[in-house]
Image (cartoon, rainbow, N blue to C red):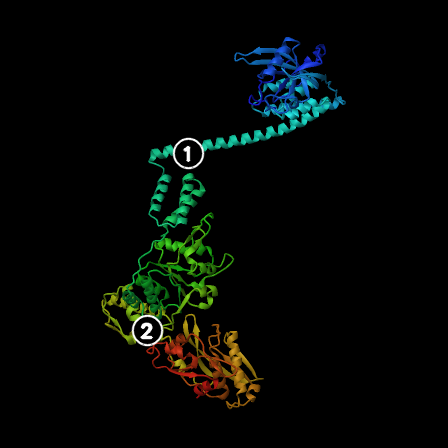
Amino acid sequence: MYLQTEEEMDFIPIIPLNEHDDDSNADIVIPNELPLLPLRNTVLFPGIVLPITVGRDKSIRAINDAYKADRLVGVIAQKDSSVEDPSVTDLEDIGTVAKIVKLIKMPDGGTTVIIQGKKRFKIGTILTEDPYFKAQVLLLEDEEATKPEDFKAYVATIKDLASQIVQLSPNIPTEASIILKNIENPSFLIHFVSSNLNTELAEKQELLRLNNLQARADVLMKLLQRELQFAELKNKVTTKTKTELDKQQREYFLQQQMKSIKDELGGDSNEREIKEMQKKAEAKKWTVAAKELFKKGIEKLERMHPSTPDYSVVYNHLDLMLDLPWEDYTADQYDLKRAKKVLDKDHYGMEKVKERILEYLAVLKLKGDMKSPILCFVGPPGIGKTSLGRSIAGAIGRKYVRLSLGGVHDESEIRGHRKTYIGAMPGRVLQSIRKIKSSNPVMILDEIDKVGNDFRGDPSSAMLEVLDPEQNHTFYDNYLELEYDLSKVLFIATANNLANIQPALRDRLEIIDLSGYAVEEKMEIAKRHLVPKQKEAHGLKEMNFKIGDKVLEKIIQDYTRESGVRELDRQLASVMRYEAKEFASKGKIKANVTPQDIEKILGRSRYNSDMYKVASMPGVAVGLAWTYVGGDILFVETLLSDGKGELKLTGNLGNVMKESATTALTWIQSNAKKLDIDKEIFANKIIHVHVPEGAVPKDGPSAGITMMTSIASAITGKRVKPFLAMTGEITLRGQVLPVGGIKEKILAAKRAGLKEILLCWQNEKDIEEIDSSFIKGLKFHYVRTMQQVLELALV
């Protein structure tokens, strides 16, 4: 329940007088004609005392004339309170007869009157409109309640609701609830509450219009319930707002105290950090988007308190932005002669790779700017793929950074995590660039073929964006939340096996095959790099002793079987440890290391070529194989035994290899007459083909001619020519097809001491690419048909 404010009406608060005045209304003679007093914003109810300020001329005249006569006036409400000079149509038809209790002349010329409602009336006829409204009125009587018990309940409910509204409304004085409790007259209670109710004028007028007291009480109760709900909601909102304001004021007060303490201790470290960041940012070559993002981040940081959890998240993000070398590039050195000299000094051989790097430098020198190529070095372990990347960086004057991808199985390692996660970090690509402080380094993506994938994502798919020259100028890192230009980075990937690289990723790489080293190359690498390195590593740099070519060749051929030089490096380390021990115990060492010394240090030879000499029985042929660690040789053995004519295959063979054996046998059967073979053998003998080292899985088509030669040798009883190896795929028509990995296979044959090699005629071009000095002493036979193979192989 609210009192109307002064802005809404021209009177002061309602003052209840004697609630039993209604009983004396019978003594008052109310004439049929009354002057009308139009009121704005309020409705007068019977029994209610109301002080009003009269300002309109018509109203002042009506009050003065009524006061001089019987002091009775008809109070009527205006339909529209904004009308200053109302006409008859602007007035309600139901009003209240009021008695002027007191008339007070104010010092400012205004008039204040206190009136009390007496009885309801209805306007009959308007008699005059000037100088004020005068009308013939019809008095209305209140109808008593038809059900007194129900009416009592209504009255009690109205009292309770009104009391609750008073308690919830801080603008209503608490005395109002005391007045409510003491009102005993139901009619006066209804009129008193209706008059003070904070509701629309039309709703109050509707209450006045109702003749039946019970109906009036019913409508009033509904209005009170609505008002109570509104008061409760308003009180709830006010309380909540006040609580929040109190909390904010408390925090502000504490922060001000902390600020004062920090000022006494020498300033706020938070402000110093932000100023330092802004100072660093001024020197950065930002992109427009980066500049805008940094500005927003700093503004957010300034509004935060350092103790809030988000402060460190925003701070770390801005710190990364400042650490990244936006558009900071090292100057490339375009001296091609110097670059070639550096590459030759660091690595022996590898002419194809060196040529590619020099071509890149030449274009860069002429054009001044170009997208970096994405190179991929593929080859066996230990041949210097990773160290070649460092050498390239030195040759062109760029910074070098290595990113190991072996075992990475989460795409967030590449693209970064969202910074909202706890412990979030940028991807390893951006971390590397942040560490190296250059936007155009040489970045080695080591072991790209060993990237894993599981339920957390597929990193090789994330690498597609990094390694695509059309996309990587806008590489998006989830942590940075911004695009970063990787187009100037020279990416060099390394891999052992191309088959393990996703096809879409392989398509983006410029593949450069690095085959294994020949014995001659290994000797040069040992003399130029490995021996000096091991001497220095074992404190023998100043010692004057030599390891001759023959000794190096013995170590390479008798103690290593590899494409690279890692095992050779380990064997040389063993020699150096022995020499260091000799010097430490005896004070001197021999000037030259002899082959006898090598056998004493490293033990008896691990590998030799005698095994190929004893392979003189029929049914044994030597094949050449390619593995991811380089080339290798393998035996194929065939033996006949009595049985029902079937083919047995053992030695952990794959499907392709098994099919090659079946194809070979079928071709031999169909050409038995040409080969002078008795057909009964195929029906009465079991042909068992075995490839030794059964624990090692073997597959591929390149052992086709070896298996065919082995089977034919066993059936015909003719031995295979000693020190002969072969490789090639076969067909049912008797054709020999080319195979891959020729250089590795030829070098493996040379290492093993073989002298003759059978190949498909289409592989001749691969032999021509090999340095002639590496294959010196090897004789090559190029064949087109399987018939030619048998003619050359069988003695």
Q: Secondary structure at mark 2?
A: helix
- Which is more toward the observer, 694 or 417? 417
**Label 1 sits on residue:** 255
Residue 90, x across and y down, in percent: 64, 23
Q: Pinpoint residue 769: horizontal percent, then vertical percent.
A: 37, 76
Image quadrant in which you'd find residue 776: bottom left
Q: Earlier in the sequence, mark 2 or mark 1?
A: 1
Tell me if 631 is positioned left or right of 1 in this view. left
Q: Amino acid at mark 1?
A: Gln
617 horizontally vs 442: left or right: right
Disc 1: CA contacts within 10 A as few (<14), some (14-19) or many (>=20): few
Q: How many numbered marks appear?
A: 2
Q: Residue at x 47, y 66 (%)?
A: 500
Q: Is residue 604 visible?
A: no
**Residue 354 screen position, x and y as percent:** 33, 68
Residue most toward the top?
68
Which labelled disc corresponds to residue 521?
Answer: 2
Does 191 sit above or below residue 716? above
The x and y percentages for residue 711 are 50, 84
Q: Quarter of the image holding residue 213?
A: top right
Q: Amino acid at mark 2?
A: Glu
Any part of residue 294 in sight: yes
Q: Residue at x 31, y 60 (%)?
A: 332
Helix, strand or loop for disc 1: helix
